[in-house]
Amino acid sequence: MKNLTLLGSTGSIGRQTLEVAAANPDRLRIRALAAHSNVDVMLSQIRQCKPDLAVLTDQAAAEELRRRYDGKTEILAGEEGLLAAATYEETDTVLGAMVGYAGLEPTLAAIESGKDIALANKETLVAAGHLVMEAVAENHVRLTPVDSEHSAIFQSLRGGTHDEVKRLILTASGGPFLHLSKEELAHVTVEQSLHHPNWNMGRKVTVDSSTLANKGLEVMEAHWLFQMPYSKIDVVIHPQSIVHSLVEFCDGAVLAQLGVPDMRLPIQYALSFPERYRCAFDQLDLVQAGPLTFLEPDTDKFPALAIAIACGKAGGTLPCVFNAANEVCVEAFLAGRIRYLEIPELIRRTVEAHENISRPGIAQIRETDARTRRYTERLIAER
Ligand code: NDP
Ligand code: MG
């Protein structure tokens, strides 16, 4: 039996994780849930899973939850509550499904208290991959990927040694705007950007998928998870999202993991590893999947991918800057404050203005994240 804390339980990955737990009741037990402010969903999750702890980081929402709930689960609030859930003594595995940089500190706290981590929250590895991986090594915990591409690579890597790997090939659906011209991209609306062809995800990652910033974040995520140099990580567009990613070995063999686009599969694998549990969900029918196609990403149309990779290669605080600028721009775009093509443009300007710091500690990461947000906000206000 694995005892879980689920950070970000009310979101897309969070809700699907609870479906995986419900499908494996004698293997997975939910001990703590945490989210930001969604009282209705949290209340129904508490009633369904009966965790020991439930946390809403928003104080007013936590108070409302306390007023509306009258049962045995202890309700906590704020950052303190979040850290208590991340380090809860009855928990052995923390599934990180919060969105954005906010997931970094609770993930580090969980690692430092000896918890295994199943990680969906890629921004954590982007902002401070060196600190997260050092903490994982020092505390002898296991970090398994939830992101579908990284789950595919993680599984394919079992076919050879680290030294035998020639390159990792991350697939990208290309998002809803794959075939639009640059001129057409200029007029993209929020509503259009929230319609992903293959996946039903949270708003931020859906916009990131459409700009290919998501694939840029995932290249950095792969660099840290698999300890691979950037020269050995490639991206290929695969619009059907059936081949979730591939590993090419030195002898020319290419191993891939395939499946229907359903996040419950990689979530379950991240929790079942090194075992495999039986699948309770739909499985792949190759004939029905139809032709599988692959093409080169167009970084002229989608510059966020190239900017992200350049930041990853430069290292230091630049990946954190890329991430913070992207978070601010996506939020501003969703709020109707900037246009679609301003997202990569404002990220580029923020990144270019940054003076890189190598091997930043956590205090420098915090400072860089906060300062970058102010800088990008100022660019938005002044334009
Ligand atoms: P959602 O926006 O659907 O959910 C985000 C979750 O995080 C919600 O539970 C939200 O709570 C919670 N949250 C946000 N801010 C805070 C905070 N400050 N403190 C505590 N909780 C917080 O996101 P997704 O589930 O789509 O994505 C989660 C992560 O997984 C992202 O990093 C994403 O890139 C990654 N991912 C997602 C995939 C997907 O299919 N959705 C696929 C692969 C990776 P509340 O609801 O109360 O606001
Ligand atoms: Mg992914």
Image (spheres, rainbow, N blue to C red):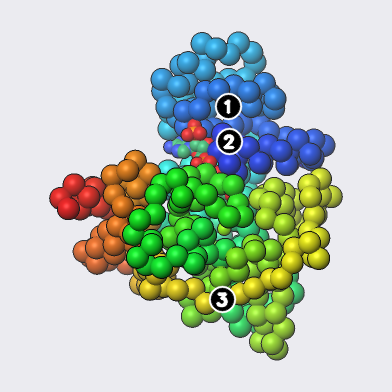
265 versus 166 height, above or below: above
Q: Position of residue 151 (x, y in %)?
A: 65, 60
Q: Which residue is mark 2?
A: 9
Report the Cα–Cα distance between label 2 and label 3.
35 Å
Q: Which residue is mark 1?
A: 41
Q: Is mark 2 within 8 Å of ligand 1?
A: yes
Name the quadrant containing residue 237: bottom right
* Amino acid beneath label 3: Leu
Q: Earlier in the sequence, mark 2 or mark 3?
A: 2
Q: How many numbered markers are drawn?
A: 3
Split into quadrants, the picture shows ligand 2 in the one at bottom right
256 versus 188 height, above or below: below
Residue 284 lies left or right of residue 325; in this view the side is right
Residue 267 visible (yes or no): yes
- Name the residue at 38% across, 44% down: 334
Residue 319 lies left or right of residue 159; in this view the side is left
Q: Position of residue 383 (x, y in %)?
A: 17, 53
Q: Position of residue 229 (x, y in %)?
A: 50, 76
Residue 111 visible (yes or no): no
Q: Split into 4 quadrants, where in the image is the N terminus? A: top right
The answer to whether mark 1 and mark 2 are in CB contact below 8 A is yes
Q: Which mark is residue 295?
A: 3
